[in-house]
Amino acid sequence: MNINDIAKMAGVSKATVSRVLNGIKVKPEYKEKVDRVLLETGYKPNRLARELVSKKTKLIGVILPSLKPNVYSYIVEGMAKVLQDKGYSLIITTCDEFNVKEDDVIDLLDFFIDRHVEGIVYVPNIITEETKAYIDTYQLPMVTIGEKINGLPAVLFDDYNASKSIVDYLVKLGHESIGYIGIKDEYHSVGYLRRLGYMNGLKEAGIEIDESMMVTTGFEKNNGYVAAKDFIKSVGQVTAIFAGYDRMAYGIINYLTKVGYKVPEDISVIGIDDDDVSAYFTPSLTSVSFDYVKTGQVAANMIIDFIKENLDIKDQVIDFKIIERNSVI
Amino acid sequence: MNINDIAKMAGVSKATVSRVLNGIKVKPEYKEKVDRVLLETGYKPNRLARELVSKKTKLIGVILPSLKPNVYSYIVEGMAKVLQDKGYSLIITTCDEFNVKEDDVIDLLDFFIDRHVEGIVYVPNIITEETKAYIDTYQLPMVTIGEKINGLPAVLFDDYNASKSIVDYLVKLGHESIGYIGIKDEYHSVGYLRRLGYMNGLKEAGIEIDESMMVTTGFEKNNGYVAAKDFIKSVGQVTAIFAGYDRMAYGIINYLTKVGYKVPEDISVIGIDDDDVSAYFTPSLTSVSFDYVKTGQVAANMIIDFIKENLDIKDQVIDFKIIERNSVI
DNA sequence: TTGTATGCGTTATCAG
DNA sequence: CTGATAACGCATACAA
């Protein structure tokens, strides 16, 4: 059953059917006839044929650092919510989570061209110079999340200020000796910017920065636990620890508890991310929350704008808020 | 740049180029010429045109109950891992997580036909009779995960035996008064089968089943907490609680701790799922683990087999194992 | 406005 | 084994 059959049944040319299908004006009498046949037959135009001639697939490519259950899931949820409504589908891919040479990103980008996706949402992890250079020559509409790359429109998290606010918050509670166990600077936003926020927060509070109270690591499992171990060994007393992200905080609290510190009585611990289970952790984790679902929605609308060639797309910064729970006093 | 251009440059017909492209035998001399031009130009055949004539898209549709971060993420990871290698892409969709009338599944199924996906992996939540009936008439290759639907090939979890093993395990530790806070029977495998395993486990251990010690609920957030509250109120003393899934266990432990019970000293709690953070929970949660990544891989291979018309596809049952941690003594 | 004819970029058919 | 040509199913330029 194709457009030809419909045309015959309705007694018009297939061009007319095509016009009805695409909402182009035709004589009402014809339109009515065609519509009736359409209804009777339940005919659906063949998407593949349409794609071939229109060169549009209603496909959006997504590059994630990981498919493991974490905040990226919310981002995807947000994107799916707005894109599904607009008839777009997501093709989700990942590049190796801890891959320092993240250049399979380039392969993915090529793959998306082959797939004729209309746009790309890229959530970068570590970004290599090669990737950047390649992106500069890349033709497809693309927005990034969490990092600004070249001139691409981006949805950004206010990592720096979030981090600074955490320090302010702790200082306000009376903490003066605040340790930082975070992420390597390689990860620009979640690593460098958060650390910078921490340092400037201290500075503004008139607290001297003690380099030995600042530890960074990667995203390996259990890194919080291990880092906390090293940290506590080498540093004397601290009244609060600022963890680079919530899962890091879990490990830290785990270790602290194990060696006899009480959280938060002896040491307060605060995270960033407001991970799904932080509310259920013991003690429930005070954290900073970004609205990840909204992030996905914003990114989705942004890439659609880009595809539709709405110029003047502005970067969007996602707000944060401190979620007070029981791991900080 | 299309196949015609290549043909001209190589001095052969486009049919010959097509043959070279598809590994069909041609005179070596021609093949060489074509290959050289292919290399020089970096030409890639247009996927959309291929799709139109071959009616194959290398697309797999996935229906998930939710995109929130949880075990489904691992399933997707497993699927992506094997499918990406074979050139297939995933289109991931969700139907409303708690939607009792889950019949947007039917819409999704229609959508997949429109998209010309080659096969479908369906992870059902609640399955309505309408959905079942519709699936009976459905044409596309489809496998399910976690539930057996009609005659479709399925990857199943051994929920019944996992559940029974938990009871055995608790009984062996000396528990005789074991409560069950689980999922509604509507959810067949995770609800009914797990509850059945619990009951038969007790029966075989010679322990009488006390209906008042068995509570079930849905997947609403915080249900563990709320259910535990009702449970403890109405039931007297219990030495162990079997939670229908890990996040339920979090809520239960939270509540118990809050009202002064110590876990595991006063009451042991065990979950199912081995959720990502159960190891970090306080106390770390004893649970039953299914290999979800493997589940995804198995499902992926299964749907590929189905697509390739390998008959004789057998259901696969995913093993479980008890992960002993600190919430049970 | 309508219908005819052509194009989209492949693969498949069939005669040579 | 090769090449011309017809599908595939639709959109659209062009002529009527």
Image (tube, coloured by chain):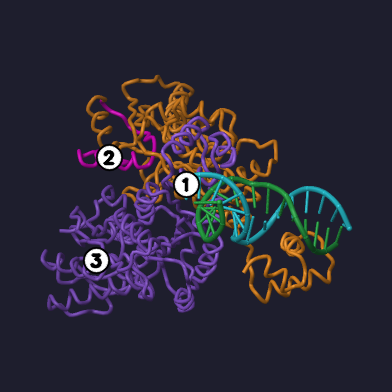
Chain colours: A purple, B orange, C cyan, D green
Which of marks 1 and 3 precedes in the sequence?
1
Check the image and report above or below for B180 versus A73. above
**Residues in magenta, as a range:** B236-265
B90 sits to left or right of A213: right
**The N terminus of chain A - image quarter:** top right
Q: Secondary structure at mark 3?
A: strand
Q: Residues within 10 Å of mark 1 (few under 14, many from 20)?
A: few
- What is the number of the mark on residue B222? 2
Residue B163 x, y percent position in the rendering: 46, 32
Q: Residues within 10 Å of mark 2 (few under 14, many from 20)?
A: some
> Dot 2 falls on which chain?
B
Q: Which residue is pictured at 31% across the width and 54% down the height?
A: A275
| Front position in the image: A213 or B159 | B159
**The C terminus of chain A - image quarter:** bottom left
Residue B64 x, y percent position in the rendering: 45, 42
| Tag 3 and tag 1 share a subunit | yes
| Tag 1 and tag 2 share a subunit | no
- In whole angstroms, how far apart are the C-alphas of marks 3 and 1? 65 Å
Callout 2–callout 3 Cβ contact below 8 Å: no
Query: The residue under label 3 is which amino acid type?
Result: Ile
| Front position in the image: B113 or B258 | B113
The part of the image, by quadrant, that contains residue B295 is top right
Is B259 magenta? The answer is yes
> Dot 3 falls on which chain?
A
- In whole angstroms, how far apart are the C-alphas of marks 1 and 2? 53 Å
Check the image and report above or below for B172 versus A230. above
